[in-house]
Amino acid sequence: MAPDEDVISAAPATHYRVELTQTKETYECLPHETLLQGMARLGRRGIPVGCLNGGCGICKVAVVQGSWESTGPMSRAHVSAEEEARGIILACRAAPCSDVQVEVLGKMQKSVFKGWGAPAIGTPNNKTDG
């Protein structure tokens, strides 16, 4: 009996590609793996992992393209319901559901981009002169 083509095409992805918008660096996340877990595999020293349960807010990111699902509650002290609806989330509490583009925000920028020479978004060194 031949395999059903519809069943094969509907198989879940084995991984999702995550791109950091500031550096264009990419990494992979397994299904149901958090964005932070995948980011830790970049092997970069100093990626802050904080509490790992959505309470400290250190891993705040913005999903600018793609879809994600919550893996647990996020502290409203760090991410409002409105921010979450716009894709501003905590990387320790979100798993990609597709390939995604992520902008690193806040405290995590310094650690993630150390040595890249790319200034954080919104800093004076990141202006374009016309």
Image (tube, rainbow, N blue to C red):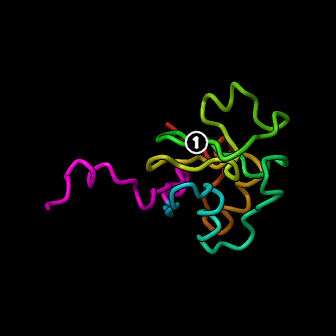
The N terminus sits in image quarter? bottom left
Position of 100 with respect to 72 (left or right) is left
Q: Which residue is drawn at 72% across and 65% down?
A: 47
Depth order, front residue of 58/98: 98
Position of 44 with respect to 74 (left or right) is left
Depth order, front residue of 104/3: 3
Taking the magenta stretch, the answer to whether it contains residue 54 is no
Depth order, front residue of 51/78: 51
Q: Where is residue 14 in the image (x, y as percent from the top left)?
A: 42, 61
Q: Position of residue 28 (x, y in %)?
A: 49, 63
Depth order, front residue of 51/31: 31
Q: Where is residue 103 in the image (x, y as percent from the top left)?
A: 59, 46
Q: Which residue is drawn at 73% across and 62% down?
A: 111
Classify mark 1: helix, strand or loop: strand
Q: Where is residue 72 in the image (x, y as percent from the top left)?
A: 71, 44
Up-down relation of residue 79 to residue 40 (above or below): above
Residue identifier under label 1? 69
The magenta segment: 1-24
Q: For the residue carrying disc 1, how many other residues have a C-alpha within 10 Å: few (<14), some (14-19), or many (20+)?
A: few
Position of 78 with respect to 19 (left or right) is right
Taking the magenta stretch, the answer to whether it contains residue 12 is yes
Query: How many discs appear?
Result: 1
Q: Which residue is drawn at 40% across and 53% down?
A: 12
Query: Which amino acid type corresponds to the residue marked 1 in the rendered image?
Result: Glu
Most extreme residue toward the top, as rendered? 82
Most extreme residue toward the front, as rendered? 1
